[in-house]
Every structure is written in structure tokens, then in C-alpha cells.
Amino acid sequence: MSLTLTLLATTAGLLVVFFWWVRRNNVAVYPAGRAPAQLRSLSTGCELGTALLAASTDTATSGTTGRQGGTATSPAPAKAPKRQKRHEGPSRRDFLRFGLLASMGGTLTAFAGASLGFLWPTLKGGFGARLDIGSEADIAAGIDEGGGHFEYPAGRSYIVAYDPAQDPNGVYAEITNGAPFMALYQKCVHLGCRVPWCAQSKWWECPCHGSQYNRWGEYQFGPAPRGLDRFALTIEEGRVIVDTSTVVTGPSRGSGAPLDQPPEGPHCTGA
Ligand code: FES
């Protein structure tokens, strides 16, 4: 949307500049096939330019000669000066200047709008920013209430319990930073559907094409190329902070993802 506005404003600006240039240089623009016959017969741009130049020179010369001839032979009777039409309102030049300034202003405004739209999530603390999602105690209680997960829609994240004892190689140490939680991105890594929690199996099961991930979002089944992506999470002064500005790629299939969790009940999707 913002890009469209920018393009429209830029196009309008270019058109105004073009017409201003045409008027300023007295260039005649003819629709296709409507040029005067003497111009149509000219085959090249050089001939056209030469003809236009010659025409303008002739006009200037004849004007001068006419004035001189008039002085030498018979002076024309003095004519009463023509009454100039009084022109109310802005001149054409002022109008074009105003149009140019307006289009530049429009372009700048559209650019500012696009930039603001891009930065807005960060400025207002939505997805794309570092989010304070609650106290450590509240998140732990939320995970219990959710039967193993806590959903934070504004951050498009799920929070699950993380036990470093189940991750002896520290595969997720960098994104959990010593916290007892891990933050998963809700978006399926296959084609981007939101992956819901299956309360029976306690896995993540995508309704679109059936990809399945265990509680830590590790790939189990289906067309997904890897486990769910995730976000870095830290605990700062008792508050749980999820950094949604950077998506951390999930573990690839067969990478020896550490959680050994068979489904704890029937699946919610086909498999
Ligand atoms: S989008 Fe989830 S399996 Fe295709």
C-alpha cells in the first residue's frame, strides 16, 4: 500500500515536471498521426530539430525585418495599445510551481508513511520488537494452564517449558539464555500456516498439510523441511523478554534434535 502511494506520488511528480518542461521550452506535443504535414514528412529527429530551429529563426528574422521595413518606408499609424486582459488568480507558472511542490510534498509524505509503517511494530512494541510478555511466575502458570504451552498472540509466539537437562549438548542454550522457557514462532515452516497446539498428542500439528512437531517444535512428520523457527528469550529482572526482531531458524530434519517426546495421545491432524 505504502509502496503504491510512493509510486503514484512519484509518477505524478514526474508528470508535472514533464509538462512544466514542455511549457517552458515551447515544445509542441502532437498526438500520434496529428502532427502538421511538414513535420510528418521529416524522417529523423535531426531533421525535425533542424526544421524547428529554422522555423523559429525565420520567425525572428521576419519580425525584425518587418519592424525595420516599417521604419524605412511608411511608418504605420500609431495604434492604441492593446488592452491587456486582466488575469485574475495565479499564473500558469505559479500553478506549475505549486504542482511541482505539491507532488514533491506528496512523495516525501508517502516515503515518511512507508518508513513509519515499517518501523511501527518496533515503536509500538508489537511483533518485530523485544517484547515483555510477563513475569516469570505468570508465564510458568500460563504454561500449566495451557497444558504445556502459553500463547502470546501479539508476539506470534508460543512459550514452552525448557529443561536444559533434556538438552545435554546445549542445542538451544543460545536462545534460552538460562531461562526455563523456549519461544517458538507460530508460523509453519512449510507454507506459513499458523500451527496450533494439539491438546491430545501435545505436539504442534499443522492443519494445512499435516506437518507435525513435538513440544519443542522439532520436526516429526509431514512436508515441513525443518523444525519450527524460534526467538531468543531472556529473563530480565524477573520479566520474560522475547526478541521477535530476529527469527532463529529451527533445527533441520535429522539433525539429532534433543527432545525425545512420543505423542501423548491421538493426533489432531491425519497422521
Ligand atoms: S503449511 Fe503447515 S504443513 Fe503446509
Image (tube, helix red, strand yellow):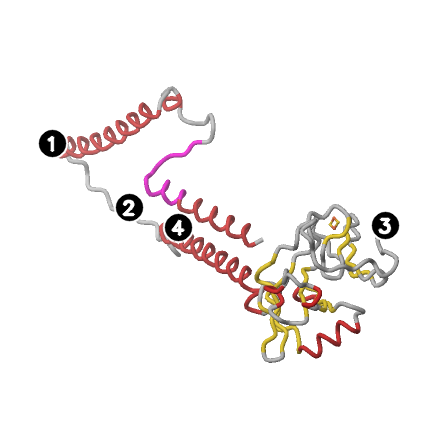
Choose top left, top right, bottom left or bottom right for residue 54.
Answer: top left
Choose top left, top right, bottom left or bottom right for residue 258.
Answer: bottom right
Residue placed under numbered mark 1 in the picture:
72
Residue 226 in the image: x percent, y percent?
A: 68, 50
State if disc 2 and disc 3 touch (CB < 8 Å): no
Q: What element carries label 4?
A: helix
Looking at marks 1 and 3 on the same chain, the residue that comes earlier in the sequence is marked by: 1
State if disc 2 and disc 1 touch (CB < 8 Å): no
Task: Residue at 62%, 79% (x, y): give it.
Answer: 238
Looking at marks 3 and 2 on the same chain, the residue that comes earlier in the sequence is marked by: 2
Task: Residue at 34%, 50% (x, y): give it.
Answer: 85
Looking at marks 1 and 2 on the same chain, the residue that comes earlier in the sequence is marked by: 1
Looking at marks 4 and 3 on the same chain, the residue that comes earlier in the sequence is marked by: 4
At label 4, counting other C-alpha atoms closer than 10 Å, the crowd grade (few under 14, some 14-19, many 20 or more) is: some
Residue placed under numbered mark 2 in the picture:
82
State if disc 3 and disc 4 touch (CB < 8 Å): no
Tag of residue 270 = 3
Ligand 1 has an atom within 8 Å of the beta carbon of the residue at disc 4: no
Residue placed under numbered mark 4 in the picture:
96
Residue 66 horizontal side relative to residue 37, left or right: left
In the image, residue 24 lies in the stretch drawn in magenta:
yes
Report, in whole angstroms, how far the alpha carbon at label 1 lies from the one at label 2. 24 Å
Q: Which amino acid does label 2 sit on?
A: Lys
Task: Identify which residue, 4 or 136, lies in the foreground.
Answer: 136
Report, in whole angstroms, how far the alpha carbon at label 4 lies from the one at label 3. 66 Å
Task: Residue at 67%, 65% (x, y): give it.
Answer: 183
State if disc 3 and disc 1 touch (CB < 8 Å): no
- Tell me which segment is drawn in magenta: 18-30
Task: Identify which residue, 26 or 128, lies in the foreground.
Answer: 128
